[in-house]
Image (cartoon, grey):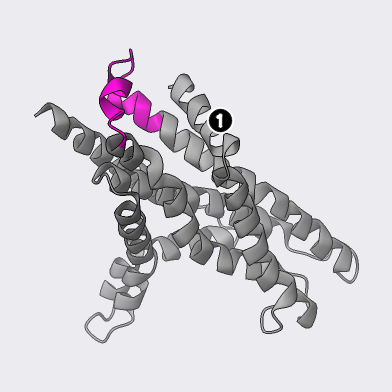
Amino acid sequence: MWSIFTKEIQTFFSGLTGYIVLVVFLVMTGLFMWVISDTSVLNYNYASLGQLFSIAPLVFIFLIPAITMQSFAEEKQQRTIEFLTTKPLTDIEIILGKFGACLTLVIVAIIPTLIYYYSIVQLGSPIGNIDTGAVIGSYIGLIFLAGGFTAIGLFMSSLTANQIIAFILAAFACFSIYWVFEFLSNQPLFYGKSDDLVKYFGMEYHYDNISKGRIDSKDLVYFLSVIVLFIWLTKISLDKRKW
């Protein structure tokens, strides 16, 4: 698994992929944090990183599928998937190696946003007037959200040899799991406790809970379940070549 992890990391940073991910994420979040007047923190009367944690999931919906789309689709396209499986590695080790590398790249992209946190702390009146607990919870939620999206992206990449199709499928799946359940819960069809049940299946509900600084085991279990489910589905997809 470690050999796959290091190989993928080297691939990301030996080409443009890793650097493009870093630049795109920081530019997009930076624009919403500091430049666009409607969302700029400079136009608010309180110190908050809410803009960052609101826009990050939307950026991830497109950014993470762009990272994962080549994971298995490229291997199939170049017919190197069979060569990869001849090594003394199980399918689950290959999947976990690629999952770890993709998630690490996303985390590396998140780390520089700590500069935003420092800036907000300094801009606060008095200095340091910011809800640090909520910020920590939001970062934890963002990492778990990235893990869920990464697992979904790997599964979609394992279904096709076309990277563009893998990207579209992953972006659509991430969007659906994040927002669709929230949308459905607000429809007249669901009322009473049923709307809460529908909302519970969506990632946005659990991400919002963690972002408020309330790190509940139910929310963490939800994200871990999504990750395990899609890693398992990816293994089943790879097993098809043996049938």
Q: Residue at x 48, y 34 (%)?
A: 100
Q: Does the magenta run of residues contain 59?
A: no
Residue 102 percent across, percent down from the top left: 48, 40
Q: Is residue 93 left or right of residue 215?
A: left
Position of the N terminus, as image quadrant, is top left
Disc 1 element? helix
Q: Which residue is mark 1?
A: 10
What residue is rendered at 62% in x and 47% in y? 19
Nearer to me, 194 or 6: 6
Front residue (pair 141, 103): 103
On screen, residue 225 versus residue 217, left or right, reads: left
Up-down: is 86 above or below 78? above
User: Does residue 45 appear anywhere in the picture?
Assistant: no
Q: Residue furthest top?
A: 88
Asked whether residue 91 appears in the rendered view, the answer is: yes
Kind of residue indicated by mark 1: Gln
Q: Quadrant of residue 39?
A: bottom right
- Quarter where residue 14 is shown: top right
Furthest-right residue in view? 126
**What segment is highlighted magenta in the picture?**
78-96
- Is residue 98 found left or right of 104 in the rendered image? left
Residue positioned most to the front: 78
How many neighbours does mark 1 have within 10 angstroms: few (below 14), some (14-19), or many (20 or more)? few
Looking at the image, residue 199 sits to the left or right of residue 15; the answer is: left
Residue 178: image location, x then y, percent = 39, 64
Does the magenta portion include 91? yes
> Residue 127: horizontal and vertical position, in percent?
90, 64
Residue 219, position as x, y percentages in the image: 44, 53
Task: Quarter of the image for the C terminus: give it.
Answer: top left
